[in-house]
Amino acid sequence: MRLRTASIATALLLVAGASTPAVPAEGAPKREARTAASVLAGMTLPQRVGELLMVGTPTSRPSTAALATIGRYHVGSVILMGNSTGGRAEVAPTVAALQDRTSAAATASTRLFVAVDQEGGKVQHLKGPGFAAMPSALTQGTWAPSALRAEARSWAGQLSAAGVNLDLAPVTDTVPSAHADDNAPIGHWQRELGHRPGPVGTHAAAIVRGMGAAGVATSAKHFPGLGRVTGNTDLVRTVVDRRTTRHDAYLKPFAATIEAGVPLVMMSLATYRRIDAGVPAAFSRRIVTGMLRHDLAFDGVVISDSLTAAAAQRYGAGERAVRFVQAGGDIALVTEAGPIAGMYAALLDKARTDPAFRKRVDASALRVLQAKERFGLL
């Protein structure tokens, strides 16, 4: 299912003119089904801003700070950080404790996206009883797409049983084979599904479809690609891609996942010299809105890579969140609770004082809620 721009615009108009539904003439009033538009209509501006934030918490137990952000800053999504070997019995209580913090006052009674990086190989954060060992993405890319789709559905079922409803996968970056070992963020860890865009796209789409069939959302990453860089944006302040162009063949895997119905796409924090030389991709309107939204017609949720990463540090916490949303992004991800207060305050202040930015916040919150509606979280 694709989330279309027209449907977002229509829903926003409905929200602007929302009124109490009429009670049927006979019998007791029927409870109206909650939709993204109706939930948005009932949200305060602070709650809408909270839907644009994702906070990190340890996988083994929820941090006090992360739990507090759900009520205090209306945070609508959480990412589980760190490795767990305790299996479903360890993860499920963590997720339940997080979901228990949702309420009418905190999140307008919507549930959280609970995300994890469960790619396979060296990036499989949830292990132990209830979670099958996943081979590396590079190995997954050698399987028949139908087999990978079936396995992805099985892996997603395991996540769902533990309460996890968003896998920040598949890695959709294509790493040229000749430079795989030199590619610090992806190739070094065998996180790529292959070395050619065509097969990468086919296999990434299989993962999206398989996990979606089990009711788990996915996120293609890291747009417009980290396969041809050297430095790791988590660790290096400036990582530059000197090859990718606006209509590059290496964008085809992202297009394939969009065609497969991927609900989220994660933005890279590298700088793309031949597209927008002055700014990391997550803060570039030319890349987020121009390339991803316009060129590839993606109408789902755009999520950032961690805005606590080294490559995002050129801006203060609040400015990072504002710049990301101005570029066309929807969920600003941070791997720890510390920056949330500053991001929330900056987004809320900007929305209260800038009508155009307020509309952008409303549109982003609606996209997040539409994704949540699709995966049964309203």
Image (cartoon, grey):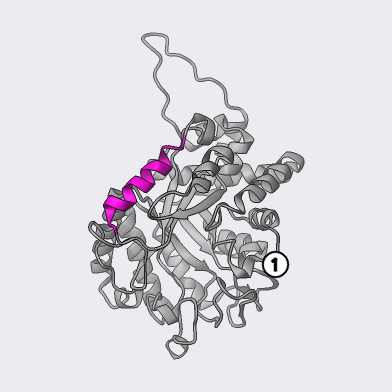
Relative depth, front residue between 188 and 378:
188
Relative depth, front residue between 191 and 363:
191
Which stretch did the figure color magenta? Answer: 86-102
Q: Is residue 175 above or below residue 153?
A: below
Relative depth, front residue between 244 and 309:
309
Q: Is residue 232 magenta?
A: no
- Asked which secondary structure carries label 1, the reply is loop
Residue lying farthest front?
64
Few, some or many residues within 10 Å of mark 1 (<14, 14–19, 20+): few
Q: Is residue 323 above or below residue 357?
A: below
Q: x, y percentage for residue 52?
A: 57, 48
The reply to whether residue 214 is in sight is: no
Q: x, y percentage for residue 368?
A: 51, 46
What residue is at 64 percent from the left and 46 percent from the top?
Answer: 344
What residue is at 60 percent from the left and 62 percent from the top?
Answer: 288
Residue lying farthest top?
26
Res. 99 image quadrant: top left
Relative depth, front residue between 131 and 152:
131
In the picture, measured across the screen, residue 374 lies left or right of residue 237, that is left
Q: Which residue is mark 1?
A: 314
Q: x, y percentage for residue 15?
A: 58, 32
What residue is at 64 percent from the left and 53 percent from the top?
Answer: 325
